[in-house]
Each structure stands twice: as structure tokens, then as C-alpha cells.
Amino acid sequence: MSYFFRARSSEDPTGAAPRVGLTAGRVLGGAVERNRIRRRMREAVRLHLGELPLHVDVVLHPRKTVLEMEFARLEREVARVFASVADGAEGKR
């Protein structure tokens, strides 16, 4: 999974909560597969959202392997990405 993030300033009027976006392009499969990928990703993000700093935007770009991988492994991957984002966002402040 690849990801992008940007730290927002604390004066940003969009609020203090972290924002997470998901991509699922046609290259990942048909509508059913893309929707399943998005559902699995949303749940993994929901479980680990508290690990992100408050003023950060994150975009997650999954690979097609998300369809077949165990959910526990997907969760670990999202937690790893969020830890990396937290480290990077603190360095940018």
C-alpha cells in the first residue's frame, strides 16, 4: 500500500480531526471488488484512527492484494502506515 500525507497548520479552519482518504481506481477490479476493498480499508482505518496526530491529511492507495489478505494483516499495515505518518508529521512541525 502506498500513502501520502500532509500536516495542516493548527489554524486551519477545517478542524482538528485527522482526515483520511481512500483511492480505489478501476485498475483494482470491477465495482464489487473496489467496494469490498473500500469497506475493508474503512474498517481498518476506523480501528486505528486514534493513532494519527490531529492536524494531518492522509491518502491511502491500496493494491489489489487487499482483497485476499487477512484482515489482521491489513490492520497491521494500516497501523504501520499511521505510525510512519505520525513520525513524519511531528518532524514537519
Image: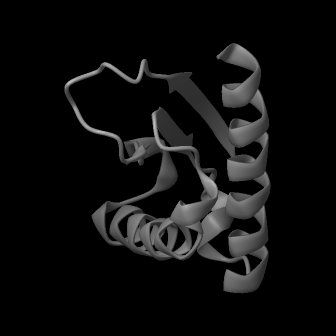
Tell me where residue 78 sits by quadrant: bottom right
Residue 40 in view: yes
The reply to whether residue 22 is in sight is no
Q: Nearer the viewer, residue 73 or 17?
A: 17
Residue 81 placed where, x, y %?
Answer: 73, 48
Residue 62 at x, y percent in the picture: 59, 50
Task: Give the mark count.
Answer: 0
The residue furthest left is 13
Residue at left 53%, top 23%? 7
Classify residue 23 by image quadrant: top left
Quadrant of the rendering where the C terminus is positioned: top right
Is the residue 10 above or below the residue 73 in the image? above
13 left or right of 35? left
Which residue does the image show at 31% across and 19% down from the upper left? 11
* Res 13 → quadrant: top left
Instruction: Reply above or below: 32 against 4.
Output: below
Residue 74 relative to residue 11: left or right: right
Question: Residue 79 in the image: x percent, y percent?
Answer: 72, 62
Query: Which residue occupies 40% across, 42% down?
Result: 25
Q: In the rendered image of this protein, does residue 8 appear above or below residue 28?
A: above
Q: Residue at x 67, y 83 (%)?
A: 71
Residue 38 spot, x, y in % from top left:
40, 64
10 or 64: nearer the viewer: 10
